[in-house]
Image (tube, rainbow, N blue to C red):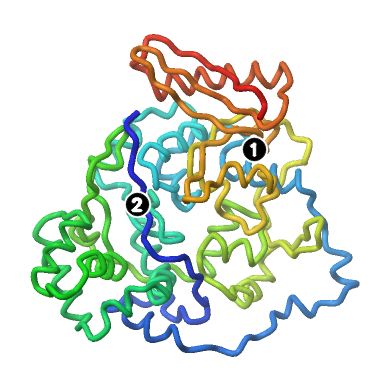
Amino acid sequence: MIPIPLMFLPFPFVPVDAQRSKGDGARPRRGSVLRGAQEAAVTTPRKRSSSATRSGAKAALTPVLTKRELNRALLARQFLLRRTRESVPHVLEHLVGLQAQAGNAPYLGLWTRMEDFQLEDLTRRYEQREVVRATLLRSTQHLVTARDYQSLRPALQPVLDRMFSHSAYPRELAGLDMDALLAEGRRLLSREPLSSVELGRRLQARWPERDAQSLAFVVRVAESLVTVPPFGTWGVGGEVTFTPSASWLGAPLEPALALESLVRRYLGAFGPASVKDMQHWSGFVRLGEVFERLRSELRVFRDEQGVELFDLPDAPRPDGDTPVPVRFVPEFDNLLLSHSDRARVISEPHRKRVFTVNGIIRPTVLVDGFVRGMWKLKWEKTRVTLHVSPFARLTREDREALTEEGLRLLSFAAAEASEHEVRFAPVA
């Protein structure tokens, strides 16, 4: 497989106050980066969530979910308890997108969740503009359906604005006419798709005293841009080019998805979850008031540490002893990125091995529903080997199951290779 370059935005992730997202149901306006920068200095008095004042007696009556029960609930909603026969668009919308920092990761993420998934099932939809790759959650690249993108992007714009306002770019571009910059960026991108580097060069031709990278990223944050295939299709690397979503999809953005709807979507894919979990996933902060508005229509639980959890009433919550097949999960998968407390799927010592200091999140192996190791593919001429690095001793049954599932993964990801092999590294 061809390595795919990462596409992180070069500024820190700063959650945004959900109460400043007043535009639910309103159409997005231009120049939101400027407004986000101006609002960064504004503070709002904190209000105590009413959930914090509930009596201890009532809390004691709240059902408690064990770590294994939370694990099984998450796996069921992620289609990792059993593979689904639903379509690619259905799966992407249920999961609220798939992390796409690495180009091949969404393909592997769908393969491990879907029955009979083939490479062309996603490539065709990407090329036909049914799905798009763009900057969304946590300012990272996600693959979502075109329909979801139209309302998700404006909903998440306040998060992107806040992240920009906490970066160095506002200082570097102080005094610049932002409206003129965004208008020029739109003009350039409407003529042809451009890479971030080329966009910066062309913008710098008009503002030669300004940093090219800074100019380009202002446009990328403020404007609704999507990446253009073939980049992002299986095995294709190279330079990423961007184009306005309105021209690519033939329609302007829709009204922003309401925060209440975003909460429901999140719980459907990742619940039961706490307010803090959703804030970690979305980038918004102080979502307690939104959850309170929904409390009457949600189920309420607590985890074993007493943290209040919310869930959709009819969402699956399997027994904690439900058998779980082994799974190979790709790098950057949202399974590991969507909760503040990740104990339901990975321990803290194991997280430190999977999450690297430079932002890489390695592919993982699930055994009994929890991360128990990492994996990688190694290509040698006509042979492709799947290397499994377990974190602890595996039983014979687990090794056999991983070998069988690993050979299926090789048949999918390296079909052209004449030899496939699964190897297990010694326990480190």
- Where on the picture, by quarter, is residue 391? top right
Res 222 quadrant in image: bottom left
Residue 322's place in the image compared with 53, above or below, is above
Q: Would you place residue 413 above or below residue 370 in this image?
A: above
Residue identified by numbered label 2: 7
Which residue is at a point 35% across and 83% down the rendered structure image? 35
SS label for mark 2: loop
* Image quarter in which the N terminus is found: top left
Q: Residue 164 location in percent, x, y?
A: 37, 72
Q: Earlier in the sequence, mark 1 or mark 2?
A: 2
Foreground of the two, 253 or 278: 278
Q: Is residue 68 above or below residue 248?
A: above
Q: Residues within 10 Å of mark 1 (few under 14, many from 20)?
A: many
Residue located beneath label 1 in the image:
371
Q: Amino acid at mark 1?
A: Val
User: Where's residue 193, x and y in %?
Assistant: 15, 54
Where's residue 30, x and y in %? Answer: 26, 77
Q: Is 408 left, or right, of 211 in this rendering?
A: right
Q: Give the quadrant of the C terminus.
A: top right
> Would residue 200 be found to the left or right of residue 145 on screen?
left
- Residue 160 in the image: above or below residue 47: above
Residue at image coords 32%, 80%: 171
> What is the crowding at mark 2: few (fewer than 14 residues within 10 Å), some, or many (at least 20)?
some
Picture coordinates of residue 406 (x, y %)? 53, 21
Residue that extends furthest to the top in the rendered view of this protein = 418
